[in-house]
Image: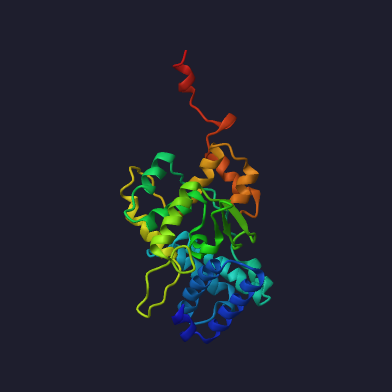
Amino acid sequence: METAVEGVPEFKELALSLEKSFAINGKATSTLSNYLRCLAHLANYYKCSPERLNEEQINDYLYHCQNLHKTPSESFFKHTIYGLRAAYKVFGMDKKRIQLPQIQRQKDLPVVLNKREVLELLNTPQYLKHRLILAMLYGCGLRSYELCNLLQADIDFDRKTVFVRKQKGKVDRYVPLSPHLARGLRTYFKTENPVKHVFNSQVTKDGVVGPLTTAGIQWVIKECRAKVNTQKKFTAHTLRHSYATHLLEDGLNIMSLKELLGHAHIETTIVYLQVSNFGSSIKFSPLDTLFAK
């Protein structure tokens, strides 16, 4: 990002324009960061700001991304296209937006931990802070950046709620605070005295105390992953998937789940119906009835 700003003068103007647009429209800063990171790669590749490139140059770059040995991840490819769409929209380049390839909606079903695996994971960390980070992700269904931005003032022990400020989905929401989490958080606040945010990062050399970072969450997951008796490959977001699936299996209706997850559209929530086993939707094998006779 810094290389693009310094080496491609026009890119700074693009970055500032996108930043203003995202702020005005209340879009997530994490999404903006992903877009700018990918657009910076494109700017550095051509030594030219992306909105100034023609269709052939864009297509050559996308082909380069998909076919070289050091291929960026699928999310990198998608964020590059989404970032270009956002840039073209800001600069009123509707024709260029139409020329970009369509991104197919992700159809892969989410990985979900069962309750035994979640319990093992929560019992793995040595430190209370790390146990609470995992417990908040699962117990409140938070996205990683939502947990990083969570303030102590957002925790209401009396009402047993956690206030999650709008980012994706553009709506604020309250989620229930489990008594198990409440006990742990009360102890943590008294012993650790975090500053402003629920979880802080390590103090820098300048003595600055900032909020927990998504990289910090990833480190906790990585440290604990190998200690859980499972073959599943899981991330911090897997705990959000598990939260949604387990709530459905425990009897919560789909509309209430949509509100708890902060989804803008019910279509996003419905995917969890495909992975849940509950009520009349419990799936079984014909072998179960064949040998029951």
Q: Is residue 78 left or right of residue 199?
A: right
Q: Give the total number of marks visible in the rendering.
A: 0
**Vertical position of residue 128 compared to residue 77: above or below:** above
Point 59% across, 61% down: residue: 168
Residue 71 visible in rendering: no
Q: Nearer the viewer, residue 120 or 291?
A: 120
- Residue lying farthest to the top in this orientation: 293
Point 40% across, 68% down: residue: 201
Point 48% across, 26% down: residue: 285
Point 47% across, 53% down: residue: 136
**Vertical position of residue 40 compared to residue 176: above or below:** below
Quarter location, residue 264: bottom right
Point out residue 162 in the picture as x, y percentages from the top left corner: 56, 55
Quarter location, residue 163: bottom right
Q: Is residue 208 left or right of residue 20?
A: left
Colour mapping used in the image: rainbow
**Vertical position of residue 43 compared to residue 275: above or below:** below
Point out residue 234 in the picture as x, y percentages from the top left corner: 41, 50
Residue 130 visible in rendering: yes
Point out residue 143 in the picture as x, y percentages from the top left corner: 51, 57
Q: Nearer the viewer, residue 259 or 42?
A: 259
**Vertical position of residue 207 compared to residue 253: above or below:** below
Q: Is residue 91 left or right of residue 141?
A: right
Q: Nearer the viewer, residue 82 or 266?
A: 266
Point out residue 283 in the picture as x, y percentages from the top left corner: 52, 30
